[in-house]
Image (cartoon, rainbow, N blue to C red):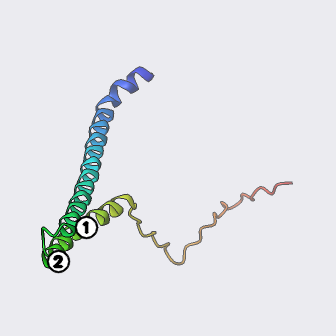
Amino acid sequence: MFLIDDILLSPAKGLLWVFREIHDAAQQELAGESEAITASLSELYMRLETEQITEAEFDAQEKVLLDRLDRLQAEETAAAAPEKKPAKPRPKGRSTRRKSSPGVEPAIPA
């Protein structure tokens, strides 16, 4: 019985494995992009300190890099937070208690 289950479920398990690999690769790429932006920021600070760029150029480039970093972090937190589905409202006027059948008395524990 277990052999048949394994044979029948193997395509679904393989597809699930592919999706997990794609998800892991995307997460690694996002992490690599964040690190690249951070490295660019530190290089930008070094260029400002060594007076290779002006303060105005620094501000413009820093704003672009920080905006990209903020956008990446917002995407990561949105992907990590599960979406909450609103609860279905209960129909009004209906009782959630079970009614006993006519002629049948509910059992009372002694």
The x, y position of residue 103, in whole percent, is 71, 59
The quarter of the picture where residue 39 lies is bottom left
Which amino acid lies under the numbered mark 2 shown in the image of this protein? Glu
Which quarter of the rendering shows the N terminus? top left
Q: Are marks 2 and 1 in contact (CB under 8 Å)?
A: no
* Residue that appears at 34% across and 24% down: 7
> How would you rate the neighbour count of disc 2 (Cα within 10 Å): few for under 14, some for 14-19, many for 20 or more?
few
Which amino acid lies under the numbered mark 1 shown in the image of this protein? Arg
Instruction: Give the secondary structure at mark 1.
Output: helix
Which residue is under mark 2?
Answer: 55
Nearest to the observer: residue 14 or residue 49:
49
Is the residue 5 above or below the residue 66 in the image?
above
* Residue lying at the far front of the rendered structure: 50
The x, y position of residue 89, in whole percent, is 47, 73
For residue 19, the mark is: none
Which residue is under mark 1?
Answer: 71
The x, y position of residue 5, in whole percent, is 40, 27
The quarter of the picture where residue 38 lies is bottom left
Nearest to the observer: residue 47 or residue 73:
47
Instruction: Give the secondary structure at mark 2.
Output: helix
Nearest to the observer: residue 110 or residue 11:
11
Q: Is residue 80 left or right of residue 108?
A: left
Which quarter of the rendering shows the C terminus? bottom right
Q: How far apart in space, not on screen, are marks 2 and 1 (Cα)?
A: 24 Å
